[in-house]
Image (cartoon, rainbow, N blue to C red):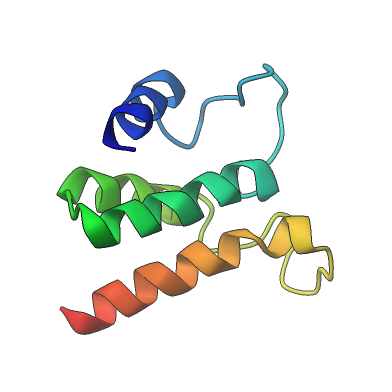
Amino acid sequence: MVVANDYFMKKMAGCRKSNCHRKTQAKQYMTRGVYYEGLMALYKIAPKSEYLEYAINWGEYHKWNMRNGIRTRNADDQCCGQTYIDLYLIDKKT
């Protein structure tokens, strides 16, 4: 998991880069949101500060918001919320 994640972090270089298919889409959308859910799970078993920083930068870049705002009912748009909650719970412990 660590090797695969390190590859992804180097290849995708943060929240401003387009996705693997060179499409431009909001980076808090489901495809990226699922990655960050996995990153939070990895952080729980391998707590590297760069994992936490990578996820926090993503949330800050998007102002902790969902792709289509807070009124969206689309699960693809809400996926980022799980990572936001995980980061809140980690911060709350420190």
Q: How many marks?
A: 0
Q: Residue at x 61, y 26 (%)?
A: 19
User: Residue pushed farthest bottom?
Assistant: 92
Q: Residue at x 58, y 51 (%)?
A: 33
Asked whether, in this view, residue 7 is left or right of residue 73, the answer is left
Question: Residue 44 in the image: x percent, y percent?
Answer: 27, 62
Question: Residue 89 in the image: x percent, y percent?
Answer: 34, 79
Q: Look at the image and tell me in which quarter the N terminus lies.
A: top left
Splitting the image into 4 quarters, where does residue 92 fall? bottom left
Rendered position, 8 above or below 91: above
Can residue 67 be spotted in the picture? yes
Q: Residue at x 51, y 44 (%)?
A: 35
> Which is nearer the eye, 50 or 57?
50
Can residue 68 be spotted in the picture? no
Asked whether, in this view, residue 71 is left or right of residue 92, the answer is right
Asked whether, in this view, residue 18 is left or right of residue 45, the answer is right
Splitting the image into 4 quarters, where does residue 20 fall? top right
Question: Residue 3 in the image: x percent, y percent?
Answer: 29, 28
Rendered position, 70 above or below 55: below
Q: Look at the image and tell me in which quarter the C terminus lies.
A: bottom left
Splitting the image into 4 quarters, where does residue 45 fall? bottom left
> Which is nearer the eye, 66 or 79?
79
Question: Residue 67 in the image: x percent, y percent?
Answer: 71, 54
